[in-house]
Amino acid sequence: MDDWESTPLGSVAKHSRGYSYSSSELKEAGEPFITLKTFEKGGGFRVDGVKSIEATVPEQFRVSAGSVLIANTDLTRAGDVVGVPAVVPKQFDNAVFSMDATLFIPDVNALDERFLALALGTSESREFMRGNSAGSTVLHLDTSRLDQMPILLPPLKEQKRIAEILDSLDQTIQATEQLITKHRKIRQGLAHDLLHGPPSENRATDRWKYCKLRRMGKIVGGGTPARERPEYWNGTIPWITPSEVTAYSKKHIKETQDYITELGLASSAAKLVPEDTLLITSRASIGFCVLAGSPMTTNQGFKNLIPHDEIDPDFLFHLGNTLSREMTRRASGTTFLEISAHDFGQIEIHLPPLKEQKRIAAILDSADRSIHENEAELAKLQRLRSGLAADLLSGKVRTVAA
């Protein structure tokens, strides 16, 4: 490929494993210690995975900011961690790295350190790492094979240019992630203040009242038609399960994996609930909620609250998202936790008048839209980054050297 060539990694970089430590050397306070927990699945540095160590550690087991490490071991079944790269952030300059990591020291005349981190994250490098790892419960990378790993290497100037382009995009992605985190925190505080009612002198109205959930509407459960009866399934009535709700990010659920027939509905304890009913999980994973986007039913893992006319469904949805802790506190069970319809109905909340419910829901809806827009932009940037990295690191798209 013109001036690009496949090069054995050992010809352009040296590598060494980290410090072999004992558990007694791990302390609450001490020097930063980079371990397996520091590596993100698929690659990246987890700041919250850094531990602390108190030991006399030789200089050879310390890393400078910007150093490239890979994980030597893996506890995941899919091998999502073994061999993944991580770049040491500035705040962990001179940190100790453990035997679960390998440090690369590139030949600066042939290999850019930032480009190396990118090359180690390609699908080809990941396949090599997994293919040279063994173990049943824990995967261990055969680091003696790293020198033979081929990497596609452009001229040094182009390596630097590729790294600059992807670094710039990574900074934009990081800034977007930080913005989303900030907005989520603001939204969380806003929801707490609005839904739990600030002091009466600061409210638009003092006509808030304490109200139990059972007074806000009708509570009904779900049910499951017999699986072995084909006439109960493949109908037109949406039948929702908790797994669909825990993974759901929108306010209204409209599509589902299963649809039951009228006969299936009649044969079970399931009840058909109208649009805008609050569907909230009440078994095992408790407190995830959505609003019904059409008439539908659920399995037994829900408590479904059909609001009366003085309850705004959008307000009810936002309120439902704050109930997980109280529902879990009231739940019981040996195999799994579950809250009964009675105990769910006894939960007491601070309820504003309908007009203020709508105002609160509109404010929180606006905050959620802003977060969803930023999340959509983040997903777009991540797709762009993935495609651009593949094109640049394969040489499909060439750069103009800076």
Image (tube, grey):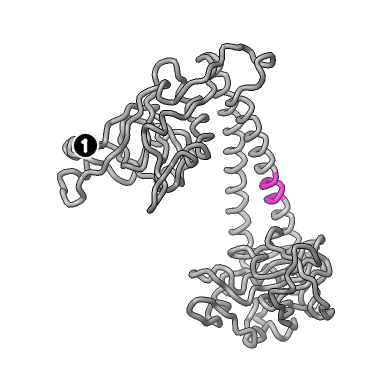
- Is any part of residue 158 visible from this angle? no
- Where residue 173 sits in the image (x, y, percent)? 67, 50
Q: Going by the image, does 323 lie left or right of 229?
A: right
What residue appears at the point 17 percent right and 39 percent down from the top-left corner? Answer: 267
Q: Which residue was labeled with disc 1? A: 265
What residue appears at the point 81 percent right and 67 percent down from the top-left corner? Answer: 31
Q: Is 173 included in the stretch rendered in magenta? A: yes
Name the quadrant containing residue 151: bottom right
Amino acid type for the residue under numbered disc 1: Leu
Nearer-the-camera pick, 43 or 382 = 43
Name the quadrant containing residue 265: top left
Q: Is 47 included in the stretch rendered in magenta? A: no
> How many marks are shown on the rendered structure?
1
- Where residue 145 sits in the image (x, y, percent)? 62, 86
Q: In the image, is residue 287 above or below residue 316?
A: below
- Where residue 252 sits in the image (x, y, percent)? 43, 33
